[in-house]
């Protein structure tokens, strides 16, 4: 680990210890995939409090961690808000990208760790943020590029979202990470190997660098820069002993 990663690990262990010693629920900022991998890689004996992660919806990539002294007896809400960013006049609105929205937030001086996923749909953006900066964004975010916008709060309990996905099927010799990826991404074996060994592939938030990693039904696979897929299991087995599998590709 480099110095920054060690600091993240130390902070997560500290939050777990505070939750355990003080008998309270503690929360992290939003963690990216690399940071979630650091969390999942910490030895269990170094995290006295259990934890759960959440990013505003089931398939969120960026997630907060809640450290729980006793998960059975605590009711808690994650300190996050959902904001809808809409053009003031859709007729004159530009076609804004993920980068445009994120850039506008960074221009307000907001750290990335205070923001979660950005969901673009129907000319609007749904943004998950830490409670501490929600009102600041509502007051300050008035323009993205040349488009005037307004940010309004959404009730978290009423928010529902499931990413669009398409079903893909293919035949593989075994349910290994590299062969399942090949069903979703038409890349050469060497390129897929490069992605995995290069630290670009995460399974359920944990970095996996082995091509032969065996997947389980329901595993969520994130490939940095290429999106996410979910391995949905074996549909049938061929006479030659190959497996006909199904995956979902999210977009």
Image (cartoon, rainbow, N blue to C red):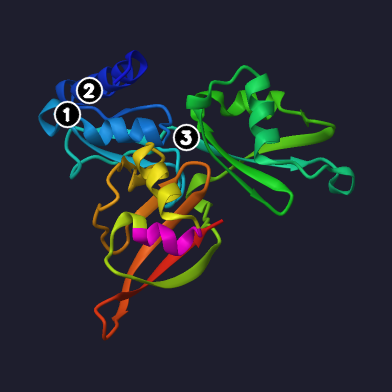
Q: Residue at x 18, y 22 (%)?
A: 17
Residue 120 lies in the magenta-colored region: no
From what the image shows, is residue 238 above or below residue 193?
Answer: below
Task: Specify the quadrant that holds the N terminus.
Answer: top left
Q: Which label belongs to residue 47?
A: 1
The disc, 1 or 2, on the residue closer to the chain's N-terminal end is 2
Q: Between 219 and 69, which is closer to the camera in this rendering?
A: 219
From what the image shows, is residue 2 above or below residue 125?
Answer: above
Q: Answer few, some or many: residues within 10 Å of disc 3's Cα (few below 14, many 20 plus, some between 14 and 19).
A: many
Q: Find residue 213 and report its horizontal and vertical position in percent.
A: 25, 52
The disc, 1 or 3, on the residue closer to the chain's N-terminal end is 1
The disc, 3 or 2, on the residue closer to the chain's N-terminal end is 2
- The residue pinned by badge 2 equals 13
Q: Residue at x 36, y 27 (%)?
A: 28
Instruction: Report the magenta residues as a range.
Output: 179-186
Disc 1/disc 2 C-alpha distance (Å): 6 Å
Q: Are marks 1 and 2 in contact (CB under 8 Å)?
A: yes
Q: Nearer the viewer, mark 1 or mark 3?
A: 1
- The residue pinned by badge 3 equals 80
């Amino acid at each position: 680990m480099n110095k920054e990663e060690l600091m993240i690990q130390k902070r997560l262990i500290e939050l777990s210890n505070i939750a355990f010693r003080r008998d309270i629920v503690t929360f992290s900022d939003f963690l990216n995939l690399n940071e979630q991998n650091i969390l999942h890689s910490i030895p269990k004996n170094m995290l006295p409090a259990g934890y759960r992660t959440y990013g505003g919806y089931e398939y969120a990539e960026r997630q907060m961690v809640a450290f729980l002294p006793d998960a059975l007896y605590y009711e808690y809400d994650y300190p996050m808000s959902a904001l809808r960013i809409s053009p003031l006049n859709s007729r004159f609105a530009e076609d804004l990208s993920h980068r445009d929205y994120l850039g506008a937030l960074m221009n307000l001086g907001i750290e990335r760790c205070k923001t979660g996923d950005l969901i673009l749909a129907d000319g609007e953006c749904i943004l998950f943020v830490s409670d501490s900066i929600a009102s600041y964004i509502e007051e300050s975010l008035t323009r993205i590029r040349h488009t005037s916008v307004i940010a309004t709060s959404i009730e978290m309990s009423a928010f529902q979202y499931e990413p669009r996905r398409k079903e893909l099927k293919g035949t593989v010799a075994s349910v290994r990470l590299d062969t399942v990826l090949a069903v979703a991404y038409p890349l050469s074996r060497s390129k897929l190997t490069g992605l995995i060994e290069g630290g670009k592939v995460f399974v359920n938030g944990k970095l996996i660098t082995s091509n032969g990693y065996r997947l389980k039904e329901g595993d969520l696979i994130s490939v940095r820069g290429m999106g996410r897929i979910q391995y949905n299991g074996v549909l049938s087995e061929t006479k030659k002993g190959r497996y006909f599998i199904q995956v979902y590709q999210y977009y």
